Image: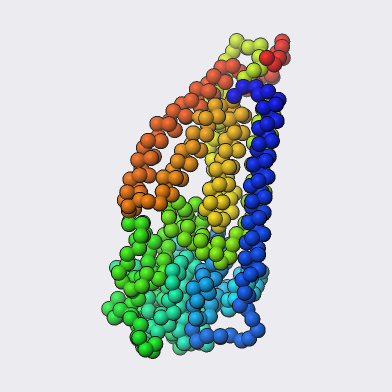
């Protein structure tokens, strides 16, 4: 950590700039490729009137959550994936009137969706929604699916579904069909309905009189509307293609909870075709977030669909800016390093008091935590995991070097957590585990083995801080003017 020769500074700066330039060029090429791919998508918003098919897949979108843009991207990816697998149905979006006009235009013209604008439905159960569940306040907009009377059947879907294969046989189901992924309550992430204005008006009446609702959102309300669905027969599509009447339970294969996959790291759902994956998990572990993989292996499946159907051109300008910013930080940090360990000052007899030393030590530890936290929060959330993790590691490296030089800390000790994160990444991403339990045990084993190294790096950082404070290069006593030194020279 001492004084570097000027030639070494220049070589280091040249290497960093060249690496950053290569990364920028690669990202620019990706922008051009993905832009060409988007231009190659046939815009399905051709001239003509809706509906174009007898059936429809429908999703909804509303504003007012912290993650509106993420759900916008998720809806586009899901709807494009339906077109890619050859779904013989219209793709309809029930959108609240406050959805941005440019989003609506993109979904209509670029994705070929039919966008139906509606007013948000008042939720009389809003007071029952607390904390994080308030994001479900407007999910009753799903009831507008019953107004799509241009269609014989509608499959209503949430944006966190991944379609593995064509599911058009669902349009043969009855007036209402849903999957039980919970032993007692069906899941409204995917359900089949027969549009009817009479049914819709009846539901509005139920909202007015305050029908019982177990969760204050759409699922609790619909469970109250169809309380006997658990006792209904299982849906099996007729071979002659005819439509059934009544209500039916759908096989679990139409709503495979992602948590089933993590037990064995492969699918084995015997109930019906393994057609649709759903992610009814914590909101921060939806599959479109870059950190969802390799923490949750299925996150890569969603990003593969996005890569094939939509691309990542929208996030590339931010990625390019971050690459250049981190490259500049590393270069300036190395070139402007003052070599404080080689500065000699006239020492004062008084030592820093304990409070000042404690504040300096705390500032260094907080700076290290910030160095690892800032890159995580400024990366666009919906980029591909390979891009997201690369940018996170590059950003943490750049800020770690900055903290090391600012507080005269040993670089290896500061970057030990960085090395541990890389190791954890490869442990989680290892593709040949025999099952989810083995994977979890491997992760815990790695964490247990890494703990002593992390502790040793923390001790090394604290010792370096103590040594720096004892030298007192720049820290006068609080409340006292800085004293003039008799000499200050560079060795």
Q: Quadrant of residue 297?
A: bottom left
Q: Residue furthest left?
A: 231
Rendered residue at 60%/37% (across/down): 399
The C terminus - image quarter: top right
Give the camera-side residue of 233 and 46.
Answer: 46
Give the camera-side residue of 357 and 148.
Answer: 148
Q: Is residue 427 above or below residue 205?
A: above
Give the camera-side residue of 237 and 213.
Answer: 237
Q: Is residue 444 above or below residue 212?
A: above
Q: Quadrant of residue 12?
A: top right
How many callouts does the rendering have? Answer: 0
The N terminus - image quarter: top right
Give the camera-side residue of 193 and 338.
Answer: 338
Residue 428 percent coordinates (x, y): 42, 48
Residue 298 percent coordinates (x, y): 43, 58
The type of colouring in the image is rainbow
Q: Quadrant of residue 383?
A: bottom right
Rendered residue at 64%/41% (across/down): 19
Residue 345 percent coordinates (x, y): 66, 14
Rendered residue at 56%/31% (across/down): 363
Rendered residue at 62%/74% (across/down): 42
**Is residue 206 something that shows in the picture?**
no
Residue 320 percent coordinates (x, y): 66, 50
Left or right: where does residue 80 sit relative to residue 277? right
**Is residue 244 something that shows in the picture?**
yes
Q: Is residue 167 above or below residue 312?
A: below
């Amino acid at each position: 950590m001492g004084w570097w020769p000027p030639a070494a500074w220049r070589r280091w700066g040249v290497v960093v700039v060249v690496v950053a330039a290569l990364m920028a060029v690669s990202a620019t090429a990706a922008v051009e490729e993905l832009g060409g791919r988007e231009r190659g998508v046939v815009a399905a918003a051709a001239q003509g009137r809706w509906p174009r098919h007898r059936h429809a897949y429908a999703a909804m979108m509303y504003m007012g959550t912290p993650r509106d843009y993420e759900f916008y991207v998720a809806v586009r990816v899901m709807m494009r994936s339906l077109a890619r697998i050859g779904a013989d149905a219209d793709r309809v979006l029930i959108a609240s009137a406050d959805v941005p006009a440019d989003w609506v235009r993109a979904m209509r013209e670029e994705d070929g969706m039919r966008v139906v604008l509606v007013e948000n439905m008042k939720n009389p159960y809003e007071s029952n929604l607390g904390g994080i569940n308030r994001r479900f306040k407007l999910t009753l907009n799903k009831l507008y699916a019953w107004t799509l009377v241009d269609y014989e059947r509608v499959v209503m879907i949430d944006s966190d579904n991944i379609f593995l294969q064509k599911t058009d046989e669902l349009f043969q189901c009855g007036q209402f069909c849903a999957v039980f992924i919970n032993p007692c309550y069906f899941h409204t992430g995917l359900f089949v309905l027969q549009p009817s204005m009479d049914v819709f008006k009846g539901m509005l009446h139920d909202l007015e009189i305050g029908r019982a609702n177990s969760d204050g959102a759409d699922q609790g309300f619909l469970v109250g509307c169809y309380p006997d669905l658990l006792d209904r027969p299982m849906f099996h599509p007729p071979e002659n293609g005819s439509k059934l009447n009544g209500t039916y339970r759908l096989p679990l294969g139409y709503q495979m909870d992602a948590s089933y996959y993590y037990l064995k790291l492969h699918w084995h759902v015997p109930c019906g075709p393994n057609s649709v994956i759903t992610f009814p998990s914590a909101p921060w572990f939806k599959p479109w977030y870059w950190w969802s993989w390799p923490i949750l292996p299925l996150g890569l499946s969603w990003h593969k669909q996005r890569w094939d159907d939509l691309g990542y051109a929208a996030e590339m300008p931010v990625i390019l800016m971050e690459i250049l910013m981190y490259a500049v930080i590393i270069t300036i940090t190395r070139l402007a390093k003052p070599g404080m360990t080689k500065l000699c000052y006239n020492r004062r007899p008084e030592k820093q008091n304990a409070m000042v030393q404690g504040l300096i030590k705390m500032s260094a530890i907080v700076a290290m935590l910030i160095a690892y936290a800032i890159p995580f929060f400024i990366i666009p959330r919906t980029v591909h995991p390979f891009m997201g993790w690369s940018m996170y590691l590059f950003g943490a490296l750049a800020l770690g070097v900055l903290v090391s030089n600012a507080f005269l800390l040993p670089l290896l000790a500061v970057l030990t957590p960085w090395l541990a994160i890389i190791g954890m990444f490869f442990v989680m991403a290892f593709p040949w585990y025999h099952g989810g339990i083995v994977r979890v045990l491997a992760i815990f084993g790695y964490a247990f083995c890494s703990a002593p190294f992390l502790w040793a790096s923390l001790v090394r950082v604290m010792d370096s801080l103590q040594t720096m404070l004892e030298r007192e290069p720049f820290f006068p006593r609080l409340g006292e003017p800085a004293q003039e030194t008799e000499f200050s020279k560079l060795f």
